[in-house]
């Protein structure tokens, strides 16, 4: 855990420092229900309960391979909604029990946007 979410061998999203205490974090799992099949398919390195974001393969090849087994239009729409919902959160700190992470909402927004760009390339 080095403060990065790897999205390829040479690219990553920096995990921004949390601005709000954990007690003020907003739970985002209810906003991500339609993304559960995606999380399950990308949870390749370990399990989120153990490794958080590091359990997932967020590289474009893994995402596009996963998208090929799903409905890309539905997944893109679910990501668009999730991105909008995360942007609307007032707290700068979010928490996902499913993904086992507290994160700055800008970090999480960047991750969702990266995934959406990979999905969009498959439409």
Image: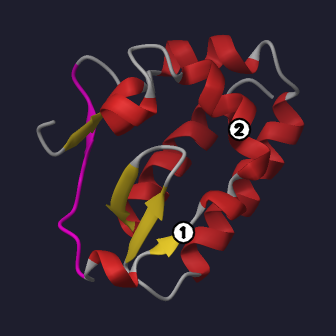
The residue lying at 48 percent from left, 14 percent from top is 44
Q: Establish if 116 lies above or below 20.
A: above
The residue lying at 68 percent from left, 16 percent from top is 66
The answer to whether the residue labelled 1 contacts the one labelled 2, judged by CB atoms less than 8 Å apart, is no
Q: Secondary structure at mark 1?
A: strand
Which disc is residue 27 wearing?
1
Q: Establish if 31 lies above or below 11.
A: below
Q: Residue 55's x, y, as percent?
A: 39, 25
**Image quarter of residue 42:** top right
**Image quarter of residue 92:** bottom left
Which residues make up the magenta segment?
10-19
Q: Secondary structure at mark 2?
A: helix
Q: CA distance from mark 1 to mark 2?
A: 15 Å
Q: Establish if 105 lies above or below 46.
A: below
Q: Which residue is mark 2?
A: 36
Q: Residue 36's x, y, as percent?
A: 71, 38
Q: Residue 43's x, y, as percent?
A: 51, 22
Give yes or no for residue 41 being in the magenta stretch.
Answer: no
> Of all residues shown, which one is farthest toward the left?
2
Q: Establish if 31 lies above or below 112.
A: below
Quick check: 119 left or right of 111?
right
How many neighbours does mark 1 have within 10 angstroms: few (below 14), some (14-19), or many (20 or more)?
A: some
Image quadrant where one finds the C terminus: top right
């Amino acid at each position: 855990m080095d403060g990065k979410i790897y999205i390829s061998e040479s690219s990553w999203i920096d995990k921004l420092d949390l601005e709000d205490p954990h007690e003020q974090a907003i739970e985002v799992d209810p906003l991500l229900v339609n993304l559960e099949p995606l999380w399950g398919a990308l949870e390749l390195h370990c399990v989120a309960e153990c490794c958080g974001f590091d359990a997932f393969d967020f590289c474009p090849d893994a995402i596009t391979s996963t998208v090929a087994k799903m409905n890309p239009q539905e997944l893109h729409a679910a990501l668009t909604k999730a991105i909008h919902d995360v942007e609307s959160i007032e707290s700068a700190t979010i928490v996902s029990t499913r993904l086992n992470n507290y994160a700055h909402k800008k970090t999480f927004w960047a991750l969702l946007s990266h995934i959406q760009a990979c999905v969009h390339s498959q439409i």
